[in-house]
Structures are given as C-alpha cells and as structure tokens.
Amino acid sequence: MKCPVCQSENLSDEAEYAAFENTARFRDWEPGVLQWKDLAVGAERARICLDCGYLLLFAGGAKLEKLRKGRPA
Ligand SMILES: [Zn+2]
C-alpha cells in the first residue's frame, strides 16, 4: 500500500478511527420498520503516512460488506 500523496510505502499499522460527522450517506438503502433507512458509512479504520502525515481512512468491515452486497431489492 502506498500513500496517495507522496507515494511513500512508509505507512503506520492500521488503527481504529472515530468520526461522528464525516459519513457517506446512501439514501434509502436498508429496509427499516416502516420505511427505508439510509446507510451512513464513515471511516472506522485509518493508516497514517509516516513521511508526509497523510491520513488514509477506510470504512468499517460491516458497512463495507453491506455495500458489496448492494441495495436489497
Ligand atoms: Zn505520504
């Protein structure tokens, strides 16, 4: 894996990342009780480029799996 900014391969190990506002929201993605719910995907994992400090953010595994499966019919 390389830093997308400086191309360095000197990245940190993966760390837990906490964010409460920054999410990608997929409208009407999941069936809810009475209506469809949005699927909000935020960064849950991170690596940091140890050369330039760029923060690489990754979605969590459970949300990623939902996206891979696609929107239920
Ligand atoms: Zn970098």
Image: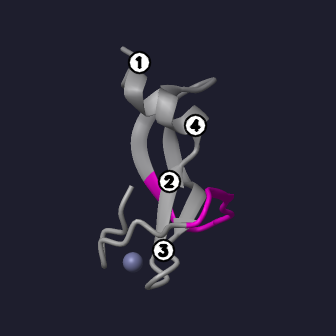
Query: Mark 2 sits on what residue?
Result: 58
| Callout 1 amino acid | Pro
Q: Is residue 9 shown above or below 64?
A: below
| Near-viewer residue (36 or 73) | 73
Q: Is residue 33 shown above or below 55?
A: above
**Measuring 45% from the left and 78% from the top, which residue is drawn there?**
54
Q: Which residues are magenta?
A: 12-24
For the N terminus, the image quarter is bottom left
Q: Position of residue 60 (x, y in %)?
A: 58, 44
CB contact under 8 Å: marks 3 and 1: no
| Callout 3 amino acid | Cys
For the C terminus, the image quarter is top left
Query: Mark 4 sits on what residue?
Result: 61
Going from the N terminus, do you reach mark 4 or mark 1 first?
Answer: 4
- In-image side of 57 versus 73 (left or right): right
Tell me the element at label 3: loop
- In-image side of 58 versus 71 (left or right): right
| Near-viewer residue (55 or 6) | 6
CB contact under 8 Å: marks 4 and 1: no
Query: Mark 3 sits on what residue?
Result: 49
Tell me the element at label 1: loop
